[in-house]
Amino acid sequence: MAPSLIAAIVLLACVAIIDSSGFVFARWGVTVLSLIVLVFAVRGRAWWAAVLMAAIAVCWNPLAVVPIPGEVWAALQIVAAALFIVVGIVVKVPRETETTRASRP
């Protein structure tokens, strides 16, 4: 849940700097955090969340920039923050216990 909350905070905090050059750092942060949450979603077998996190990683990727106008970015920032919060609350990753680790070959 922590990566989801951090990503939501970054998304909401960076709405004001969408048109500045510092937004690229926010894009890096959101991309990395969405990939981390994607791994948790896959481990929790929440495929719908994995698809959403992959879409966010693609849209916020700073290397292959998706041309989206500033007003749309601002709306997408809020939507993505809400998605991160929902995924962070809903997706549960099963913990490994000592017996499951010991039974592995």
Image: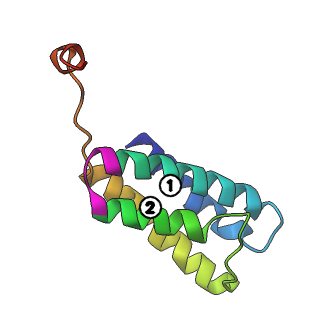
Question: Residue 61: where, in percent of width, then height?
Answer: 65, 64
Q: Which residue is mark 2?
A: 53
Identify the mark nearer the N-term, 2 or 1. 1
Q: Which residue does the image show at 71% across and 63% down from the upper left?
A: 62
Q: Residue 84: give x, y in percent of width and height.
A: 41, 58
Residue 3 — which label?
none
Instruction: Give the colour scheme shown.
Output: rainbow
Highlighted range, magenta: 42-47
Question: Which quadrant of the figure contains the C terminus?
Answer: top left
List x then y, in percent, for residue 64: 71, 69
What is the quadrant of residue 23 in the picture? bottom right
- Bin the neighbour count of mark 2 within 10 Å (Cα to Cα): few under 14, some 14-19, many 20 and up: many
| Res 34 label | 1
Nearest to the observer: residue 39 or residue 37: 39
Task: Give me the residue at 24% from left, 25% from top.
Answer: 96
Asked whether disc 2 touches disc 1, contact meaning CB atoms under 8 Å apart, the reply is yes
In the rendered view, would you say 2 is above or below 76? above
x%, y% of residue 58?
57, 67
Q: Residues within 10 Å of mark 1 (few under 14, many from 20)?
A: many
Amino acid at the residue labelled 2: Met
Closer to the camera in the image, 61 or 19: 61
Q: Residue at x 53, y 49 (%)?
A: 33
- Secondary structure of the residue carrying tag 2 is helix
